[in-house]
Image (spheres, rainbow, N blue to C red):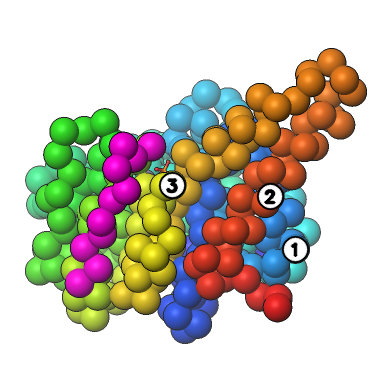
């Protein structure tokens, strides 16, 4: 069932759980996460990085994602992840996303607010929800990643932009961690108590289960998984005997592994709707 990001995260806020946002890259990763949602009856967010819309993969994937939104009975949102600017957000909307992320987090706060607000004003006209980012969430390869989002800045950013969801820097980064991260759980709770926007945790891959649970308890409502989706695909792919069967048969094992991974995360986040 087609949901906007705001609608799906409102459900999570009410239920005190988080919705997993899975980055998809091809048909097998999409089929894996869709089957996981179907089996668990969980709400999920299917998202793609901006480059996939730019390189044409998104053009092929978007109609199938829209088909999944219409076919499944559980709430599904289709989201642009890390949109770099207004053109990227418009392009994703044209492909049928129900929400976009504008990532102006490397800009000073005033310019971040200005850019984000432009996207919010435009998206509102189209009934599209918006996620913004305040406090840059970088890569695990960066030297330093401890500049947490300040609560006062978050309050100002949410009030002045009118965003629906807010990605905050609380100790995570994108990619594979050399060492398990320790999240700023108190900061999450403080920002959650003072802002209306739904809070988003990026860099979910490799975060220990107890940290994920604590983050959800403190108020995180969307958790992004990208790297782990790739690993679930590749771990199964490298075990295959590529010439043993037709391609659709061998690749179904890969989609199955992505599904198993997604079910694990759905349960961890409290989003599973079956016993
Ligand atoms: P990971 O690849 O570290 O899971 O991060 C995903 C993400 O935050 C996508 O925006
Ligand atoms: Zn991210």
> Looking at the image, which residue is at 34% across and 68% down?
215
Most distant residue in the bottom direction: 14
The reply, left or right, for residue 210 in relation to residue 230 is: left
Name the foreground residue: 94 vs 147: 147
Residue 267: percent from left, percent from top: 58, 67
From what the image shows, is residue 224 above or below residue 63? below
Dividing the image into four equal quarters, which quarter contains ligand 1?
top left
Mark number displayed over residue 259: 2
> Looking at the image, which residue is at 32% across and 48% down?
180
Q: Earlier in the sequence, mark 3 or mark 2?
A: 3
From what the image shows, is residue 83 above or below residue 209? above
Q: Earlier in the sequence, mark 3 or mark 1?
A: 1
Residue 33: percent from left, percent from top: 65, 50
Q: Which residues are magenta?
A: 176-186
Mark number displayed over residue 205: 3
Queried on whether the Cβ of the residue with tag 1 lies below 8 angstroms from ligand 1, the answer reads no
Local crowd at mark 3 within 10 Å, few (<14), some, or many (≥20)?
A: many
């Amino acid at each position: 069932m087609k949901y906007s990001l705001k609608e799906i995260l409102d459900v999570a806020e009410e239920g005190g759980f988080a919705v997993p946002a899975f980055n998809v890259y091809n048909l097998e990763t999409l089929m894996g996460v869709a089957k996981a949602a179907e089996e668990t009856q969980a709400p999920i967010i299917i998202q793609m990085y901006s480059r996939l819309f730019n390189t044409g993969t998104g053009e092929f994937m978007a109609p199938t994602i829209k088909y999944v939104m219409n076919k499944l009975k559980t709430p599904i949102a289709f989201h642009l992840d890390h949109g770099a600017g207004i053109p990227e957000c418009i392009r994703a909307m044209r492909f049928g996303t129900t929400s976009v992320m504008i990532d102006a987090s490397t800009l000073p706060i005033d310019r971040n607010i200005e850019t984000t607000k432009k996207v919010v004003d435009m998206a509102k006209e189209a009934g599209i929800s918006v996620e913004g980012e305040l406090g840059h969430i970088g890569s695990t390869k960066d030297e330093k990643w401890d500049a947490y989002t300040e609560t006062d800045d978050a309050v100002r950013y949410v009030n002045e932009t009118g965003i629906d969801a807010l990605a905050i820097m609380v100790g995570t980064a994108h990619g594979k961690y050399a060492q398990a991260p320790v999240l700023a759980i108190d900061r999450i709770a403080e920002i959650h108590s003072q802002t209306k926007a739904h809070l988003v945790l990026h860099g979910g891959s490799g975060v220990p289960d107890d940290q994920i649970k604590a983050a959800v308890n403190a108020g995180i409502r969307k958790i992004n998984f990208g790297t782990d989706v790739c690993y679930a695909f590749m771990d199964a792919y490298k075990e295959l005997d590529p010439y043993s069967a037709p391609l659709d048969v061998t690749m179904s094992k890969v989609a199955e592994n992505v599904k198993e991974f997604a079910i694990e995360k759905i349960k961890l986040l409290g989003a599973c709707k079956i016993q």
